[in-house]
Amino acid sequence: MFAIIQTGGKQFRVQNGDVIFVEKLNAAEGDVVDFEVLLYEKDGEVKIGAPTLEDVKVQGKVLQQGRGQKILVFNYKAKKNIRRRKGHRQPFTKVEITAIG
């Protein structure tokens, strides 16, 4: 049994017990969140949403809020003495899938 969910502009294939890193959600650690279900498969039977399935729920528990590793962004223009260096850390939410169905 698995489902394809959508959150943060991305799609994830999930099963019970999976731990995924998604774009930052407005939820505290320990909260339960619901996701939009695009596709659901159980025992070879597939349900496809148009665009989402209303009768199937995927719930997850927020394990952690955090920020990813720093990446450096370096911009320059040749022969103009223009150089700029910036850092960026993308926020994320670590979610454990607890229930599908």
Image (spheres, rainbow, N blue to C red):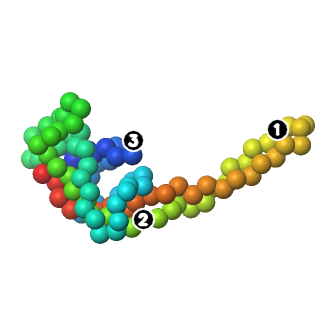
Frontmost of labels 1 and 2 is 2
The residue where tag 1 is placed is: 77
Q: Under tag 3, what secondary structure?
A: loop
Q: Is residue 45 left or right of residue 23?
A: left
Disc 3 marks which amino acid? Gly
Q: Which mark is residue 65?
A: 2
Q: Earlier in the sequence, mark 1 or mark 2?
A: 2
Q: Residue at the spot x=82%, y=38% of the render?
A: 77
10 Å crowding of disc 3: few (<14), some (14-19), many (20+): few
Q: Are marks 1 and 2 in contact (CB under 8 Å)?
A: no
- Whether residue 73 appears in this view of the structure is yes
Residue carrying label 3: 9
- Marks 3/2: CA–CA distance: 18 Å
Element on which disc 2 rests: strand
Camera-nearest residue between 28 and 90:
28
Callout 2: few (<14), some (14-19), or many (20+) C-alpha neighbours within 10 Å? some
On screen, residue 52 above or below 16: above
Query: Furthest residue to the top?
Result: 50
Q: Residue at x 42, y 52 (%)?
A: 23
Amino acid found under the numbered disc labelled 2: Gln
Q: At label 1, which amino acid type do we have?
A: Lys
